[in-house]
Amino acid sequence: MKGARCYHPRPLETLHPGPGPHPCQSRRHGIAAWAALVCFALLAGCMGLPDVSERHWDRALPARSDSALVRTAQASVPPGELSGLRLVASGPQALRLRLALIDAASVSLDIQVYQFKGDASGRLLMRALRDAAARGVRVRLLVDDLYTAGDDALWLGLAATPGVEVRLFNPFMAGRDSHLSRLVESALGSDRMHRRMHNKLLVADGALAIAGGRNIADEYFLPAPRGSYVDIDVLVAGALVPQMAVGFDLFWNSEHAHALHTIVDEPLAPAPRQRAFARAIEAPCSSAMCQALGDVLDGDDPLLAELSLGRMAMHVAIAQVAYDSPDKIENEQASQDMAMLATSGTQVRLLVEQAMRQARRELLIVSPYLIPGAAWVAGLADLQRRGVRVTLLTNSLAATDEPMAHLGYRRYRAAILAHDVALYEWSPARGSRVLREMVVGGTVQRLHAKAAIVDREVLYLGSMNFDPRSRDLNTEFGLLVRCPALAEEVHALVDRLKREGALRLHLDADGRTLYWTVGDEGPRLDGFEPDTDFGSRLLLDLLEPLVPEELL
């Protein structure tokens, strides 16, 4: 998550330094620095957030007939209780679609996201939002504050645009330019800092919306040098969109959402801030990512062609929207008991697990971070006893960007396999050779999609992982859709991911030893986690006794 660094030459007198400090002195300085950082984090955790009790409730603007997006939505979906849905599985298409909706909006744009990086893709979207506001569009942007370190100047510039308001969810009050200080504050400060808004949502003109698993960063749309993500979004029209807008309003008006200017000091007046913002987002760029961005934007896209013609082919279905309460971040304890889930704000998990328990023939789950827990494994066993075929796809240790989460997952692999569950792990070695069109010209390395398919009839898509963090700590957003055609489309996509980019796990006859195969019955891979090195495995082995599962 590091941003680009600028090189600043050292002053002349430092080019030939004298003797360095004594090692003990260096060590004392290091200890003092860490002590200061710890004290800083503890003090920051005690700082009070601004009072928002007198703030008025700000509502989504109603859909208007003079909006081209409203007319397109009406032409694409029958009136009434039905919703239209269109799968967006390609990273480049996901970026182009967001830009197209922002460019076509004439009334309002409401965006809620866990991570919004100030990289090539992020700055392009910021520029599009600024231009939309200049056309008279009301822009509301709600960003979780975990990954905003170092980007305050960009956000201040966007917020200086008339018609744009930026709010931070669950903000850090100090150490805003340092990822390290935020990490220390999360570890040592208020428990609130562990709990984040993981929702992803965009609503344009109250008529068309995007939901799913993608954050806003190059690696979700482009062939990023350090690896990109396979993910899934869905474009929504019809009856579901006003409900999604209500969910946005709930978080936007929450006491945990704070206007940027109440958190970040602004040393500049609006006009110079706008000029500085324009220079930052419009500066020429010759990096590989900017070149890749240009290639993506030049690509043909059937979905955008339909959008421009004012009518889109969509799956029409009955669907539900679910979103956790923003007050979930205040709950000190959650439980897998359904009654507790209902009162703790964990509505997404409740809805999805109810659908999963109703499976009669088949259940397919995709989750990049999979930490099932004993009760969930018992539920899988019950499904298998009832004759339900259960298939799971998650990241391997080599593919995951969260090795600590793999600790929690690997504890349950043998138990999962003992119940005849088909368990697959995404392999970067195999994924680098296939599915390249999902991130054009790039190497697909990591799985980030979250989905569940019940009996190839009912489909869940959203931001929720199947792990304790999504269940107990983070707020989530998701859609539950009863549509065999859309479920079959996602099922086919996941089948391809399994077949061309994953390894299957098996349990040996001793009931303890794991091995992997290429395909269901391909060559057997014995031994250790495929495609990993000894050091990575050793570090996890050493950390495993020290890390509580509920924080993974």
Image (tube, rainbow, N blue to C red):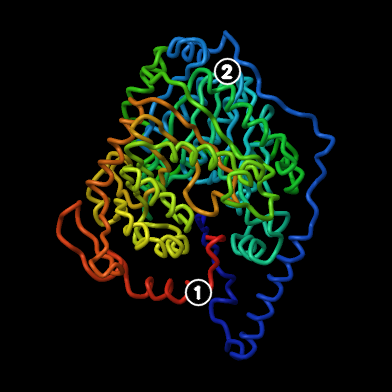
Residue bearing mark 1:
545
* Residue 274 sits in quarter: top right
Q: Which is nearer the eye, 383 or 435?
A: 383
- One can see residue 463 in this view: yes
Residue lying at the far front in this picture: please name it. Answer: 386
Tag 2 near tag 1, CB within 8 Å: no
- Left or right: where 206 falls relative to 231: right
Determine the residue positioned at 57% across, 82% down.
17
Q: Earlier in the sequence, mark 2 or mark 1?
A: 2
Q: Which is nearer the eye, 105 or 156?
A: 105
Task: Give above or below for 138 relative to 551.
Answer: above
Q: Residues within 10 Å of mark 2 (few under 14, many from 20)?
A: many
Residue bearing mark 2:
106
Q: Amino acid at mark 1?
A: Pro
Task: Give above or below for 108 relative to 346.
Answer: above
Residue 101 at x, y percent in the picture = 49, 24
Residue 260 at x, y percent in the picture = 71, 42
Determine the residue positioned at 48% across, 11% down.
74
